Amino acid sequence: MKMNDYISDFTNHLTEALEIGRSTMLDDSVAEIHNVLICGLGGSGIGGTIVADLVAEHINVPICASKDYSIPNFVDENTLVIASSYSGNTEETLYALEACQNRNAQIACVTSGGKLAELAKSKGFNLIQIPGGQPPRAMFGYSFTQLFFLLHHYGLINDSFQLEFEKGIALLDEYEEAIKTEAKFLADKLFGTTPVIYTAAGFEGVGIRFRQQINENSKMLCWHHVVPEMNHNELLGWRVNTDKLGVIYFRNSCDYDRNQVRIDINKEVLAKYTDNISEVWSKGDSRIENSLYHIHLGDWVSWYLSEMNNVDAIEIDVINFLKGSLAKV
């Protein structure tokens, strides 16, 4: 399969992921949950960042994503730790999980197999197993969805996410051809540039996902930032070396009203230095739907850019070289 085949299957992945989440039997919590840590990297880890954004307004305990070998000092027996590794062999996640075990944290795992699945089964950790053997970033829909099911199982969010996912799936299916057309238009504008991705606060994870897809699929450098934070620093950087930058704003009707105003003013400032500015308004009635819309659009943009750059979107040779070199140390 090519990457465009996986992108085309996104809503099928989400549908199957809902079925997996609903049918998986999980053990109850053994202690009250005071905080949540989601451990994962790359295509397996970005879901944690996005989920933390999306549930922040509803969850009553702190939640954060960790992308390192180490863990925060707050982790203890009242911490829910979700280890997400598609392969089940992500080095950093396994190191972090060992540290979490030493703190007697409550642990749940999302994986297709590997060492993580073996550990979960041997230790009796809650485990949601998803289909394996594919590029992790292409199976984002599976791992992302399970994080909501786990948070719901532990009583931290309600089950309204299921309907929002169903509506998001229907939305993407309805607008698939329009999304692909817009993605091709955006790819044409971003080709030959260094893309700059901006989102409002609350959707930074979606911007990071887009950046990662351009990095991995399109084999391009790019960066992202978030409003309002970038108004206090990066905005001043728009002075020199701006001639080969392509700007894209991911916008949502639910973005905080003052951030909406900020983005409009930002565009006026940036227009003095580049005429390559685009914005995409999401569709949907919920933040989950908005996020799924932008994620899917961004995935298609990354695919079209890979075709323009004449690169293999799936190939990750340099990452494999890094992992092989680390294995020797």
Image (tube, rainbow, N blue to C red):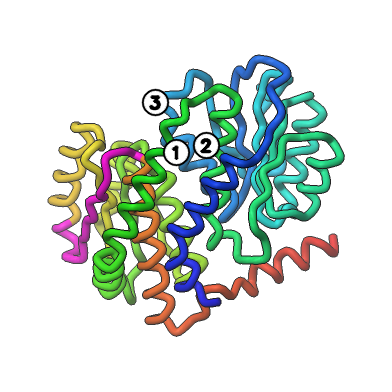
Q: Position of residue 310 (x, y in %)?
A: 45, 84
Which residue shows up at 19% across the image and 55% down it?
A: 270
Which residue shows up at 55% across the image and 47% down it?
A: 19
Given contact means CB atoms under 8 Å apart, are the residues at marks 1 and 3 in contact? no
Residue 2 or residue 69, whichever sits in front: 2
As shown in the figure, which amino acid type bears the numbered disc 1?
A: Gln
- SS label for mark 1: helix
- SS label for mark 3: loop
Callout in the foreground (1, 3):
1
Whole-number angstrom distance, CA of label 1 to CA of label 3: 17 Å
Eyeballing the image, is 19 above or below 241?
Answer: above
Q: Earlier in the sequence, mark 1 or mark 3?
A: 3
Quickly name the residue at label 1: 162
Eyeballing the image, is 4 above or below 84?
Answer: below
Residue 244 in view: no
Q: Which numbered disc covers residue 148?
A: 2
Magenta part of the protein: which range? 271-287
Callout in the foreground (2, 3):
2
Quickly name the residue at label 3: 57
- SS label for mark 2: helix
Q: Of helix, strand and loop, which mostly describes the magenta segment?
A: loop
Does residue 168 appear left or right of residue 248 in this picture? right
Residue 33 in view: yes
